[in-house]
Amino acid sequence: MDTPVPPRAAGPGPRRRDRHGRGMRGPIAPPQVPLAASRADAFADLVQDSVERLERRWPQLTDIDFLVLEVPRLDGRTWNDEAVPLGGTIVAREGRPARVVIYRRPVEIRTKSRDERAALVHEVVVEQVAELLGLTPETVDPRYGED
């Protein structure tokens, strides 16, 4: 061993192993398990389930974009705890389709379980679709308001 191996210079870039030589940790759960889905993904799935349920009765909903945003914008308005919107609508204009927006954090804060969250998401989607179509929520979904 005439030529010693020089030590590797610590430079920028990803580390391949942690300092104890055990390697980097892997994911907690495989991607196909519900545990691996983030809360935002799970919430978007609830909105999509609600939309698909309504599209069976109202096929024109395929022309409407459904969006999930974290929180509503203030835009110069002030809200108290009782007036924070859970959803909103944006009317169609200039080649843009109509949009229904559901705000994730205000809905999550008001619910304790996944079942409560799914029920509230569906109510908000129904209310916003009813507003957009100019109908009552009971017309959009006859089971609206039932627990």
Image: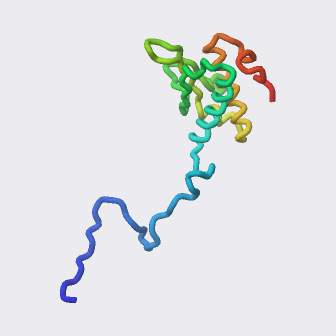
Q: Quadrant of residue 79?
A: top right
| Image point (44%, 15%), residue name | 95
In the image, residue 9 sits, relative to residue 117, either above or below, namely: below
| Image point (57%, 58%), residue name | 28
Percent of width and height locating residue 29: 58, 57
Q: What is the residue that sits farthest to the bottom in this orientation?
A: 1
* Screen quadrant of the N terminus: bottom left
Q: Is residue 19 left or right of residue 57?
A: left
* Screen quadrant of the C terminus: top right
Percent of width and height locating residue 8: 27, 71
Percent of width and height locating residue 128: 63, 20
Q: Nearer the viewer, residue 10 or 40?
A: 40
In the image, residue 48 sits, relative to residue 58, either above or below, namely: below
Percent of width and height locating residue 5: 24, 80
| Image point (66%, 16%), residue name | 130
Q: What is the residue that sits farthest to the left in this orientation?
A: 2
In the image, residue 123 sits, relative to residue 135, either above or below, namely: below
Q: Nearer the viewer, residue 17 or 45?
A: 45
| Image point (43%, 68%), residue name | 18
Q: How many circles with numbers are drawn on the protein?
A: 0
